[in-house]
Each structure stands twice: as structure tokens, then as C-alpha cells.
């Protein structure tokens, strides 16, 4: 429900409760030495109960002094209220304007975080006079939506940039082919380069489609028990040619016959992307190892290489879309910068996560951690129980 509609409803409720509740609140406030009480749903009065169920953060402010009479726990945790005052001078000024003319206002405000916290919060405040010298302040945190908008803008900008590179290369190469029409060797060379760029463009479009599908589809809508051995075998088969070209030995080992509950094609994509990355960033005549194990009901699928490794300061960003530790090397290998982002989304969709260990110059290990699927037998029927507890006959 829109907060403005909620505000209108609350104003009506407070019209009935404001007289007695505000008086009680103010007396309790003075008795505590002007210390704000953080309310909860178990509070003794109706004002407390209403504040506890309002969406976002909320507070009751004395119109004459600007002191906070009541504040919800969310308001305090957000830093909206510090001791018995509103933390934002700008918001305090809006409260003063409403106290003077009684006209409700809506205002976007930036609230600076506490000294030990980082950054600030962007909030939308709705302020209304509910009578008897009491002002209701309702705050909606906009920071999350703003971050999502920023990520969306960055994603569009990155996609545009990434598409521009192969498209521009194809345009230049086609002109070169036309100019070298009388030179068969040059035509062959430029045509080969065009094939390379077409492959890169095709991979990029394919990864974008995969990422979009992973984000838009219902997670595990078509899930079923999946044998991890089959996933590893299919992923290894998909990168076999690339491994032979780069003289990389790919081996697999560990526990057999482990199962997870999920979508096999997605899991194959995740493991294949990790193996392909390991091959791309490994020197010739080295080894990439895939290990499978189970601990505490979690299946671990690890992919280890003897490659260049990843600097510690880069580890937190490698799963971001289009982020590359070494852009030059990515251009050489034809990477799209989306492979690890796809792996992360697949893990999240399957109720798992991914961990990474790496030392520059020694190599890296990426580990998929997924809930194990166990098949339990009922004395009277053959029943398969998923990790979520759903039984499938």
C-alpha cells in the first residue's frame, strides 16, 4: 500500500487516540529525563501498537519543542532519531513548518549516518499534524531503490559499451575486406578476424540472455534431483576442446553418487563457466581439478587451477557483471565478464552460495556449495524428499 494512503488512515486513527495518548507519552517522556522510548508491539498503549505496525520508520514529535515523544525501533535503527531529537535538521525544519500551518508535507531528505557508520540514507518523509500538538513523521527509505536504479543504469551503460566493441570491430573489418578484395590472403585474414568477433558477440548475447532468464524466472520452477557426477561430466565434456588447445589437463575426483535438487542445465552452466575460466587463466601444461565432497548436508563442487590468481582486493568484485580483474587478458580470451555473475545467480537460485580462495601467482579455487538431496524410503511407498521437505512420489 502506498505510504500516502497509509498516512491518511493513520491520521484518522490518531484523531481518536491523540488526546490521551500524546498526554501520556509526554508525561512519560518528561519522567524519563527526556530520553526517547523505543517502542515495540508489546507496548502498553495504542500509540505504541500503531507505530509498531506502520511501514517504514515512524515517530511522534511534540509540535512546540520538536522533541520526539515516541519512535519506532526502525526509526532508531535507521538513525532517524538520536536521543530525543530528529537527526536531520532539514526534517526538523519540515516538522516546524507543519506545526505552524497544519498542512501535511512530503519531502525527500538525506540523513547522515552516525559517526562510526558509512555514507548516508536517502529517505522520503511524510509529515502530518494529528492534533493536540503532536506531529506524525513517517519515513520511507529510498536508498535501496536508488541503488537498484544505479545498478540498472550501470548495467545498460556496460551492455552498450560491450556491444559497441565487437560491432565496431566488425564494421572496420568489413571495410578492410572490401578494400582488400584483390588480395586473397588479406581477405582470409580479415574474414578470420570477423569470425572471431562474431563469436565474441554471440557469446555476449548468449550470456546476457542467460543472466536475464536467471533473474526473471521463478527459481527452481522445474527442479528435480540432479546427480552431481553427471553435471561434472557434462561440464568437462563442454570444455574438452578448449583444454586440449591450451594443453590443460582437466581431472575430476571426490565423492560419487551425490545429488542436489535443482535444474541440471543451470548447474552444468555454472560448473562449465568455472572450468572455462580456470582454463583461460592457467598457463599451458598445468592442471585444472574438479573435486566433489559433502559436509553437513552441503555438497561442495570445487574447481581449482594453477593459474595467475586473483589479488585479495579484487575478490569482493569478481562476481559483478562485466567486472574484469585484467581487461586486456579478457579481450585475449574472449571473455564477456558475465560468467561469474551467472554462476552466482545460479547458486542463489538453488539455495546455495559460492566461495573463492586465491593467491596471486599460485592459483584459485572456486567452490559451489549446494544443499544435498537425500532420497528417503518410506516403508510403504517410495518417496523422494527434497531439501525443502516437499515429497514427490
Image (tube, rainbow, N blue to C red):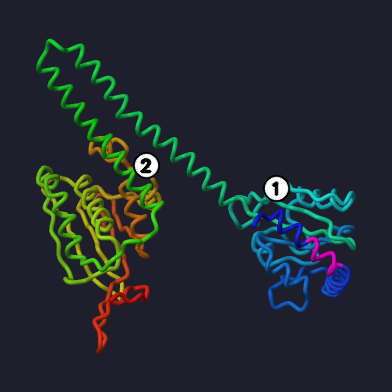
Pointers 2 and 1 in contact (C-beta within 8 Å): no
Predominant SS of the magenta segment: helix
* Residue 353 position in % (x across, y down): 36, 62
Q: Residue furthest bottom?
A: 379
Sooner in the amino-acid sequence: mark 2 or mark 1: 1
Is disc 1 placed on a helix, strand or loop? strand
Q: Residue 44: percent from the left, percent from the top?
A: 76, 79
Q: Position of residue 129 (x, y in %)?
A: 84, 56
* Res 384 quadrant in image: bottom left
The quadrant where residue 186 appears: top left
Query: Circle 1 is placed at which residue position?
Result: 109
Q: Secondary structure at mark 2?
A: loop
Name the one closer to the observer, 366 or 204: 204
Residue designated by label 2: 322
* Near-viewer residue (368 or 149): 149
Which quadrant holds residue 226?
bottom left
Q: CA distance from mark 2 to mark 1?
A: 33 Å
* Residue 13 falls inside the magenta stretch: yes
Q: Is residue 172 above or below residue 235?
A: above
How many discs mark residues in the rendered view? 2
Viewer-nearest residue: 47 or 87: 47
The range drawn in magenta is 11-18
Task: Count neighbours of disc 2 (C-alpha within 10 A) and say few if under 14, some if 14 to 19, many if 20 or more.
Answer: some
Q: Left or right: 68 with respect to 239?
A: right
Residue 30 horizontal side relative to residue 201, left or right: right
* Viewport quadrant of the N terminus: bottom right
Question: Residue 30 got which mark?
Answer: none
**Residue at the image point whose x is 20% and y is 53% from the top:** 306
Amino acid at each position: 500500500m502506498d505510504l500516502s494512503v497509509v498516512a491518511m488512515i493513520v491520521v484518522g486513527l490518531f484523531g481518536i487516540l491523540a488526546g490521551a495518548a500524546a498526554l501520556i507519552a509526554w508525561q512519560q517522556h518528561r519522567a524519563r529525563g527526556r530520553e526517547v522510548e523505543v517502542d515495540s508491539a508489546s507496548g502498553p498503549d495504542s500509540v505504541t501498537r500503531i507505530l509498531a505496525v506502520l511501514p517504514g520508520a515512524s515517530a511522534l514529535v511534540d509540535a512546540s519543542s520538536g522533541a520526539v515523544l515516541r519512535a519506532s525501533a526502525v526509526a532508531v535503527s535507521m538513525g532517524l532519531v538520536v536521543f530525543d531529537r530528529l537527526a536531520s535538521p532539514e526534517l526538523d525544519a519540515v516538522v516546524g513548518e507543519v506545526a505552524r500551518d497544519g498542512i501535511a508535507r512530503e519531502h525527500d531528505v538525506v540523513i547522515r549516518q552516525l559517526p562510526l557508520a558509512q555514507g548516508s540514507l536517502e529517505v522520503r518523509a511524510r509529515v502530518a499534524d494529528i492534533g493536540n500538538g503532536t506531529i506524525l513523521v513517517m519515513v520511507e527509505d529510498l536508498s535501496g531503490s536508488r541503488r537498484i536504479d544505479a545498478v540498472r543504469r550501470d548495467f545498460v551503460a556496460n551492455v552498450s559499451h560491450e556491444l559497441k566493441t565487437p560491432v565496431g570491430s566488425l564494421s572496420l573489418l568489413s571495410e578492410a575486406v572490401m578494400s582488400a578484395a584483390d588480395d586473397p590472403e588479406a581477405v582470409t585474414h580479415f574474414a578470420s578476424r570477423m569470425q572471431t568477433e562474431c563469436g565474441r558477440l554471440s557469446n555476449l548475447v548468449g550470456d546476457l540472455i542467460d543472466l536475464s532468464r536467471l533473474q526473471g524466472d521463478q527459481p527452481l520452477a522445474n527442479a528435480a534431483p540432479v546427480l552431481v557426477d553427471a553435471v561434472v561430466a557434462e561440464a568437462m565434456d563442454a570444455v574438452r576442446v578448449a583444454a586440449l588447445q591450451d594443453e590443460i589437463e582437466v581431472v575430476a575426483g571426490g565423492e560419487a553418487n551425490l545429488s542436489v535438487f535443482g535444474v541440471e542445465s543451470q548447474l552444468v552452466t555454472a560448473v562449465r563457466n568455472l572450468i572455462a575460466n580456470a582454463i583461460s587463466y592457467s598457463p599451458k601444461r598445468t592442471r585444472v581439478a574438479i573435486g566433489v565432497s559433502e559436509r553437513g548436508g552441503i555438497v561442495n563442487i570445487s574447481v581449482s587451477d594453477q593459474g595467475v590468481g586473483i589479488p585479495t582486493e579484487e575478490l569482493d568484485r569478481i562476481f559483478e557483471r562485466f567486472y574484469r580483474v585484467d581487461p586486456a587478458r579478457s579481450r585475449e580470451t574472449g571473455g564477456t565478464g558475465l560468467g561469474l555473475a551467472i554462476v552466482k545467480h545460479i547458486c542463489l537460485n538453488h539455495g546455495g552460495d559460492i566461495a573463492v580462495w586465491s593467491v596471486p601467482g599460485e592459483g584459485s579455487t572456486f567452490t559451489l556449495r549446494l544443499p544435498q538431496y537425500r532420497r528417503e524410503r518410506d516403508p510403504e511407498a517410495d518417496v523422494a524428499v527434497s531439501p525443502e521437505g516437499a515429497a514427490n512420489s
